[in-house]
């Protein structure tokens, strides 16, 4: 499956952004999807994931502020980001992993076989 992320931008601290990730070339409902981010000089880190069955998991740093959702009819996964902080500044990547299980999830980027191109999110203080 191919992924195309969009929706990044510059926002002030405390603001909100919604990222989208459109999938094509595969049966989207057969994939778990996730968002990862990478700040300059840092390793790519897990942000959130949603299973085929709709179960959601979050990094502690974003819990309560970010919400992941998916619309299988539109082959799209979303990341609603509220109460943004300067430390959320990074390139955000969407990713997908094919899975048979509706509840299986992973926080390991190595388990995701498909990646979008990344979208920059910058939060100013």
Image (cartoon, helix red, strand yellow):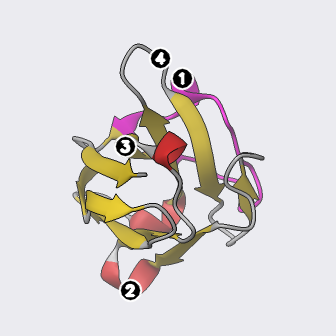
- Element marked by disc 3: strand
Marks 1/3: CA distance? 13 Å
Q: Closer to the observer: label 4 or label 3?
A: 4
Outermost residue toward the front in this view: 125
Of mark 4 and mark 3, the one earlier in the sequence is 4
Of mark 2 and mark 1, the one earlier in the sequence is 2
- Element marked by disc 4: loop
Q: Closer to the observer: label 1 or label 4?
A: 4
Q: Closer to the observer: label 4 or label 2?
A: 4
Which mark, by number, is residue 110? 1
Q: Closer to the observer: label 3 or label 2?
A: 3
- Element marked by disc 2: helix
Which mark, by number, is residue 73? 2
Q: Which residue is mark 3?
A: 93
Q: Closer to the observer: label 1 or label 3?
A: 3
Which mark, by number, is residue 20? none
Instruction: Tell me which segment is drawn in magenta.
Output: 96-114
Of mark 4 and mark 2, the one earlier in the sequence is 4
**Predominant SS of the magenta segment:** loop
Mark 2 in CB contact with mark 1 (< 8 angstroms): no
The crowding category of the residue bearing disc 4, from other C-alpha atoms within 10 Å (few below 14, some 14 to 19, many at least 20), is few
Task: Using the image as rendered, state which of residue 94 and residue 105 is in the foreground.
Answer: 94
Q: Which residue is mark 4?
A: 42
Task: Using the image as rendered, state which of residue 1 and residue 81 is in the foreground.
Answer: 81
Marks 1/4: CA distance? 16 Å
């Amino acid at each position: 499956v191919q992924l195309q992320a969009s929706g990044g931008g510059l926002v002030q601290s405390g603001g909100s952004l919604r990222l989208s990730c459109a999938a094509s070339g595969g049966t989207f409902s057969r994939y778990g999807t996730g968002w990862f981010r990478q700040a300059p000089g840092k390793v790519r880190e897990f942000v959130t994931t949603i299973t085929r069955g709709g179960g959601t998991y979050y990094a502690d740093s974003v819990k309560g502020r970010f919400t992941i959702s998916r619309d299988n009819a539109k082959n799209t996964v979303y990341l609603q980001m509220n109460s943004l902080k300067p430390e959320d500044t990074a390139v955000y990547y969407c990713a997908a992993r094919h899975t048979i299980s509706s509840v299986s999830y992973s926080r390991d980027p190595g388990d995701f076989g498909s990646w979008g191109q990344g979208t920059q999110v910058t939060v100013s203080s």
